[in-house]
């Protein structure tokens, strides 16, 4: 029995050595600097320990979605460059500038707001211009990008720090859609270079492009999913050398032998057909474990089926495959136990989603415990 199982009913273990190893892979395989993308609480892994570890391992930037995430990093004493990849409300610009957070912009109005905020606080605003080359999410259209870039470069109180784009299909086998996006980005970049306006940080690659497309590495690669040791997609698996960082565990809170004909959980969607050993696991949909049919967990190094409906805080498992299981034993919901593995990718498939959503969805009430913290 581990110490954690004496203290917690469920918890996620994050092995920071895996984060180090995964960051190092990019350091060894790319000339570009690495931005550790730690938005959404580091994809559920815990923003502060992951960011600190990634920076120790050689990442030089952190990427977040929102200003509040950037400020958490600053409050933790991290002074590395941080880029807010998403929208920053205008009333928060002064706070961002004072904290030295780099900001993403994509229109003239944002430039004016940034300049005004920078003047008010008497500090420069660091700006990255985002170009929409085909994701159709955020960004200025390529045709209009050079004009705005020129304005940023020539405006006082702002620093034209970066130019970037984001790929929509870099995790697919077919390279063509990403080739096209990259070509649009290159056109903007070349135009700026001709005028001597190339900013110091040009970036485009997410994990998938970081793994497969060296020509898109430029100055910086923005690595999220691969840093956590998770595959960008089925068509873009991680190569050898990566390791998943997160294992989601729980303890068996009760094990009981039930006679035939007993309904299990709300709605009695599962009814025992003979004497069956049923275990209770203190994890439910409020922890981020989905209330869908055909879930599995690991007990005693074996896969056991979840039976009956997943409740808010608990679920039940059928223990035929783990006859030795006792209350207090460790359960693995994501990760390895003995020889058996239940990767986040498999839960994603089972739940009709992707590994990203699985780990991001592990609720805040599940404690994160860190292994190999330095
Ligand atoms: C703009 C941007 N860059 C980089 C990333 C990292 O992507 P990935 O986790 O696929 O490496 C994301 C994540 O969605 C993103 O939104």
Image: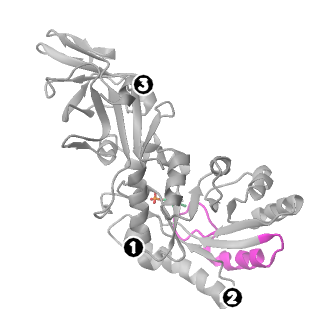
Q: Which residue is nearer to you in this view: 147 or 333?
A: 333
- Expressed as whole percent of the image width and height from the top left, the position of residue 190 reads 59, 86
In this view, which residue lies farthest toward the bottom? 194
Q: Earlier in the sequence, mark 1 or mark 3?
A: 3
Report the residue at 55% width, 51% height from top: 39
Label 3: state its secondary structure: helix
Q: Nearer the viewer, mark 3 or mark 2?
A: 3
**How many numbered badges does the structure rendering display?**
3
State how far apart marks 3 and 2 are (Cα): 59 Å
- The residue that disc 2 covers is 196
Label 2: state its secondary structure: loop
As displayed, is residue 299 above or below residue 108?
A: above
Q: Is residue 251 left or right of residue 356?
A: left
- The residue that disc 1 covers is 29
Report the residue at 22% width, 18% height from top: 278
Q: Earlier in the sequence, mark 1 or mark 2?
A: 1
């Amino acid at each position: 029995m581990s110490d954690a199982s004496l203290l917690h009913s469920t918890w996620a273990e994050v092995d920071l050595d895996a984060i180090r190893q995964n960051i190092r892979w990019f350091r060894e395989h790319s000339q570009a600097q690495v931005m550790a993308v730690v938005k959404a609480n580091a994809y559920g892994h815990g923003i502060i320990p992951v960011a600190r570890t990634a920076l120790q391992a050689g990442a030089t930037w952190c990427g977040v979605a929102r200003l509040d995430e950037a400020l958490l990093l600053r409050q933790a004493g991290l002074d590395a460059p941080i880029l807010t990849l998403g929208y920053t409300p205008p009333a928060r610009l002064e706070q961002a500038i004072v904290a030295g957070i780099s900001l993403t912009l994509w229109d003239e109005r944002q430039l004016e707001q940034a300049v005004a905020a920078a003047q008010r606080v008497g500090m420069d605003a660091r700006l990255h211009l985002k170009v929409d080359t085909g994701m159709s999410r955020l960004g200025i259209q390529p045709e209009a990008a050079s004009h705005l870039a020129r304005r940023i470069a020539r405006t006082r109180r702002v620093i034209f720090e970066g130019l970037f784009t984001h790929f929509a299909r870099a995790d697919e086998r077919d390279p063509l859609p990403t080739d096209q996006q990259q070509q649009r980005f290159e056109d903007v970049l070349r135009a700026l270079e001709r005028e001597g306006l190339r900013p110091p940080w040009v970036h485009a690659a997410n994990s998938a492009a970081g793994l497969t497309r060296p020509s898109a590495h430029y100055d910086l690669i923005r690595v999220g999913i691969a840093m956590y040791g998770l595959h960008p997609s089925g068509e873009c698996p991680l190569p050898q050398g990566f390791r998943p960082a997160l294992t989601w565990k729980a303890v068996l809170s009760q094990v009981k032998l039930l006679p035939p004909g007993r309904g299990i959980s709300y709605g009695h969607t599962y009814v025992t057909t003979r004497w069956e050993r049923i275990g209770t696991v203190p994890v439910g949909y409020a922890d981020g474990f989905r209330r869908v049919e055909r879930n599995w967990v690991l007990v005693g190094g074996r896969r056991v089926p979840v039976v009956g409906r997943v409740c808010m805080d608990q679920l039940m498992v059928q223990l035929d495959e783990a006859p030795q299981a006792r209350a207090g034993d460790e359960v693995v919901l994501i990760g390895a136990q003995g020889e058996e593995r239940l990767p986040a990718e498999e839960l994603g498939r089972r739940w009709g989603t992707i590994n990203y959503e699985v780990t991001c969805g592990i609720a805040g009430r599940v404690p994160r415990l860190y292994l190999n913290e330095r």
